[in-house]
Structure formats: C-alpha cells, structure tokens
Amino acid sequence: MQHKKNKLKEKKWVLKSQATDESRAKVSEIAADLGINPIIASLLYSRGYCDTDSAKKFLYMESEILTDPFAIADMRAAVERIELALSRDEKITIYGDYDVDGVTSVCTLYLYLKSRGADVDYYIPNRIGEGYGVSEVAIRSLAEDGTDLIITVDTGITANDEVEFAKELGVDFVITDHHECRQVLPSAVAVVNPHRPDCMSTFKELAGVGVVFKLLCALEESYTKAGGAAAALAIVSKYADLVAIGTIADVMPIKEENRLIVSYGLKIIERSPRIGVAALIDAATGKNDAQRTANRRRKVKISSAYIGFTLAPRINAAGRIRSAGMAVELFLSESYPEAYRIAEELCDVNKERQNEENRIIEEAFKKIEENGYDRMPVIVLDSDNWHHGVIGIVSSRITEKYGRPSILISFEGNDPGVKSDEDVGKGSGRSIKGMNLVDALVHCKDELVKFGGHELAAGLSVTRGNLPLFRTKINEYASGILCDDNMIPTVDADLEIGLDDVNIGLADELRILEPYGVGNPLPGFILRGAILSEISPISEGKHTKLVFTSGRNTVVGMFFSCSPDSLGLYVGDKADVLFNIDINEWAGRRSVQLIVRDIKESASQRTLIKMEHERFYEVWNGARFSPEEHILPSRDDFAAVYRFLVASVRAGEDVLKVRDISRKLAQTKDCPDIGYIKLLIIIKVMQELNIMGINEIADETYQFKVYYRSGKTELDKSNLLRRLRSQQNI
C-alpha cells in the first residue's frame, strides 16, 4: 500500500565539482592520454584523480597493496595462540555474528582451519533468542562441549565480562572484530581490531571478514615461512570471493586494500564461483545448474551492486528470520544439489523478510506522521510486534526518507499480555553524517542495557521503563550537534550531462571504474530540463517507469520505491533528474536505462510557474490583458473543470492543488487548453457562485464538495467575470 498524499521529500543535490577552464583542460588531457570517454575522465577528475598518472593508477590499481598483517595490534599473539591450538589438537570454536559479514567471516576462517586439519566448529547466536554478541550462556555450553579456544569474528570487542567468565571455565579467547572499541578492551589472549587506539596498521576500514582475511594472511605466512606477498596471494586466491561478499554487504569503503580484494573476489565469483555461491546465483535467477546449461543462459554480470542488492539480502535473511547457520552451510557445501536446496530456501526466507519489512514500514510511517516524530532530531519508534531481524532495514529506510537518525526498538518476545517496565526491547539504529551513533549511545549509556556498533549503524537493548528517558536524552544530544542543514537529505552527483550523452557505449565503459562502493560510489549524473513523455506504474504502483525526451533522444528511467502519485509531476512537465546509468538486458537485447534517485521540476519550469503566479495577481489586482493570453474562460472551460472536479471528489480525492489540477486536466481527453491563470479564475468564479463547495485550506490548495444542482448555471451573474471582461483589451 502506498501513501498517495506522501509526496517526495525535497532533497539537496550536491554536485561534487564545477567545471573550470583548468579542469576542462585536464579532463581532455586524461581522456586523450588514456583513450577513454571524456565523461569517464571527468568522473576521475571529480574524484580527485586530476592527472593522467593518478587516473591510470586508480583504473589499473597500480598503487593498491596488501599491507603487513602483523602491523595490526595483537596479530602475532593471535597467530601464536591459534598455532598452539593446532599443534595440541585443541577444539576451536569460531564465534560469529548473524549478518553477511559475520557469516562470511565464519566460513572463511572455518575453511582455512579445516584445511590445516583443525578440530574446529562454529557458533552463531540466534538473533531472536539470544541477540547480538557473546553471551555467558553460550560460553558455558561451548566449554561443556570441550571447546578450548574461542575465536570471535565480527564480534566480541565489548565482551569484557564474558571473557573473564570464560577464563574461569578454562577457555581462552582470541577476538577479531572491526567495531568501535571502548576505553577498556577485553582481557583476551589477543584483541585483533584495527580500530584499537594503539594499532599501527595504516588501513583501518576493514570489514569483520577483512580482519579475518588479515589473520589468515598472518597464519599462512607463519605456517609456510613464505614471504608475506606469497602468503597473501595464496589466501586471496582461495578466499577473496567470501571476503568480497562480506566487505560489500557491510558497506565498507571500496578503496585501497578493500578495492584490491573486492576486485579479485568479484572476478572469482564471475569466472568460477564456489558451489554455494553458484547455487545462490542460480536460485536468485530461478534456474538451477542443469537448466542453465540446457538453456545456455548468459552468465550473470557480477558487480558490487549485484552482491549488495541480490545476494546479500538472501544471505542476511537467514539470520534475520531463521538461523544464520543456513547461510554458513550453503557456503561450506560441497554438493551442488544440497547447496541449491539451501539457496532456494534462502530465497523463500528473503521473500518472507520482504513481506515483514513492508508491514513494519507501513506501521512506522504511520506512527511518524501521526505523532510528528519527523520534527525531532532523532526518530525513536517502538512496538511490541516488530520482528527483531527486520527493524534495522526499516531504520535505514526511515533515515533515508526523513534525513535524520532513527532507532527502532522491538519488545517482541516479552509477555504480550502483561507489559512491564522491566521488559527488554532490542533496537537497531541508523545515523547521518554529523552524528556518530555510538557516541550518542555512550551519552545515553545509563538508560541502556547494552549497545555497540559503528558511527552510522548500531544496535542496543533498553528496558520499557527507560525508553522515554532514552528518547529524551538522545534527542537532547542530537539537538546540540545537528543543525537543520544536517537533516535535509542529500544526494551526491558527479556530473551534469545531456540526454544525448546517455548511451550503451557509456554504460559499458563506466564498468572500468568498478568495483563500486563507499569511497568509490556508483557515478551519479544530473540531467536538466528533460521532458517527461511517459509516467507508468510498475508492480502495482510500488515503482514508476518514466520516459524522458530531449530533442530526438528518448531514454527510459526506473524510479524504484516511488509511486507515480508521489512524484508530484505529470506528463509534459520538464524535470531535472539525478540518476545512475544502468543496462537493461531482456530477451537478448541490451539497452541503456536510468536508475532515478531523485527528480524535481526543472528550474526553467519553476521560473515559468513563478511568472504565471505573478501574472495572475497582476490581473487579479486590475491589470489589463490581451485576448492572446487566453485568460478569460468560456462556458466549455467551466464545464470541463466541473466534470473533472466532480469525478475527483467521487473517487475520494477532494483536496487538490491548483497546479495538480492543471496538469491532470492537460492529460484529459477532449479537454480544452486550460492554463494555470484561467483555471484559478474558474475556481474563484465557481466559489463566488457557489457552484461547488470550495474551501481554500492552504496556499492554492482547495477542498471541494459536490452539490446537487438542476439547470444551467448563469455565469453572467459573476461580478468577477464582468470585472475581468472589462480589463481585457479590445
């Protein structure tokens, strides 16, 4: 269900660079020297690669290196303890998280240790029953099962008490994590986290699986006595696909070391994916391996976007709705039929997740609109029946829509019949530039049971009794550091281009900038003044197909998660569009298309609207006008507007803006040419003669009510019309 009255929220467009004589000369030089499209050269220039040498190094990753894993604090201690466990044949348990980063971290370390002959198992807590992080209950169970060493992946940095508890049971801990550290670290054998204040590593932006990758490089170097480069190459060739999936899914910056690993990993997935990955790709496209071979289907183009929007949600769905162990078993599978069965189940679970997400989104938007939460610096919502595994996704959607931090808290799992102040709710939050969410939670720590996460995403637990004070304190904190400008949603764009620049050749050539991600985003473009020649609903109005025309050029655009009613634009309007370029492949044909990220009336159309508005008030205040301006309405004009308004009211749409009426009338068959000024005059006259109930509830926004009338209306009785006729030049 769509909120028809919920128009697109105005967003601020940020163009990364403005063309100058110097930049144009440099762009031309880069394009000529490297033999690339000037638009590609402009993109490189806008991203800081301002000469041929730096642009070439970026394109061919000549300056990307794998750094020394032993530069990360405690890495040597971690290697020594793991090697000791291997030599003693101790039982090792990998303790992971339930998201994609956690799952790939578990699988990567598990596969490596298995290849070394380790007695190794894994444990991932259940999101619903146990929640995030290391727990004493799990540690006791693992100790009773004979575990000697627990290695955490993508978790554990705040497990101070749990590590002490493990020591009492004779279990050692090696922590590998990438979340922000607190002031006091757990007293584990080793705490491997590049965000430690004392860590000397130069690259800090590793995902949890990236930290595991560095651990494997260190272990391989220690084990084989080979050089660091040879050890790293061996690990890259075996595990870069899993590292790439986890890094992309956890939205880590695709730069420096990450860019090198992700690039290599995507190539592995495209050329010879491991069984579990291949099965997931096949299940996502609805084809199993036998069908793919029989139909000679073209291979899927593997990109960071494909990982992020197609594979990652299916992997994540396991931990959100069921058990993350499903996804682990998929990647560890050595049988294609078994892997495909699991992959199909993950696809089904993902559909279940999507349905639950849509339900929560509807409820959340309703709460925000009814309670005015969007006027607060931080939107904090709670419910007794929201699924814990989905609220993080919904929080992202809310933050994106309203341009401010949001936190969703679910008290699901508590006794629904008896609400208590001691009920514990689990929350997930997302933030915006300008407010570190972890810092905000530290400010509110006295009201929280526990919390942890990153600058822009975090999890927490809070009691029902403390929730009101938590909401107050985090909003007080945000009020002190966020201004109104922070909370206007922004969309970045690299360049302004013309519609004639958008073609399949450019779409293909853009791929030389991959892999995309944070730090190297998918290029954004702005198109000015394109005519909207078609607007069509897709998927029952959830999405919108747009056709843009400029001169003789026409291109299709897709605006996902936006209904036609939310656009506030109509066929024939001139629009400015912010978009990414994509390739649509269907029935063996390839065509370029726009993926619309935002759209608004063009500046030229806004200028025209302003001029019409000003001209109306000139006429209203007595200015003379010529017949060529087509200002005076005829009886046919009145009849056309009346029929349209009656039909709208009977369809349940009784509140309309003058501008919207004008645009919709222009699309009506056999409708006379009724411009803005003439339409406003018709409404004023109908109001004067009481032809309809007309109440102006906002600036040029009216509520209409239909009266039952018999006989013709005598328009000549209108004093307004008589006055206007006297103002028209003869």
Image: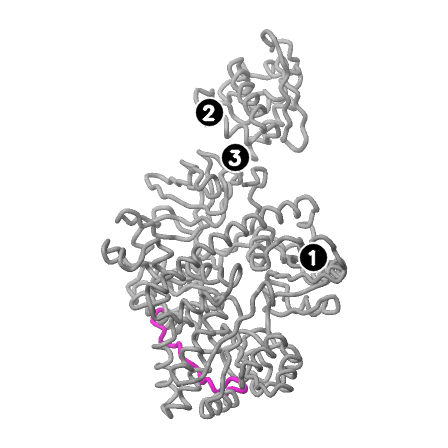
Mark seen at residue 415: 1
Please report the bounds of the magenta region as a residue range: 59-75
The front one of 89 and 432 is 89
Q: Between disc 2 and disc 3, whose residue precedes?
A: 3
Residue that numbered label 2 is attached to: 668
Q: Amino acid at mark 3?
A: Leu
Q: Is residue 65 above or below residue 448?
A: below
Mark seen at residue 616: none
Q: Amino acid at mark 2?
A: Thr
Name the outermost residue toward the top.
711
Cα distance between the residues tagged 2 and 3: 22 Å
Secondary structure under the numbered disc 2 in the rendered image: loop
Q: Is residue 676 above or below residue 48?
A: above
- The location of residue 177, given as percent across then percent down, is 54, 76
Secondary structure under the numbered disc 1 in the rendered image: loop
Residue 402 as seen in the image, left or right of residue 492: right
Mark 2 vs mark 3: in front? 2
Circles 1 and 2: CB atoms closer than 8 Å: no
For the N terminus, the image quarter is top right
Q: Amino acid at mark 1?
A: Asp
Instruction: Give the crowd class for mark 2: few <14, some 14-19, many >=20 residues within 10 Å.
Output: few
Mark 1 vs mark 3: in front? 1
The front one of 295 and 214 is 295
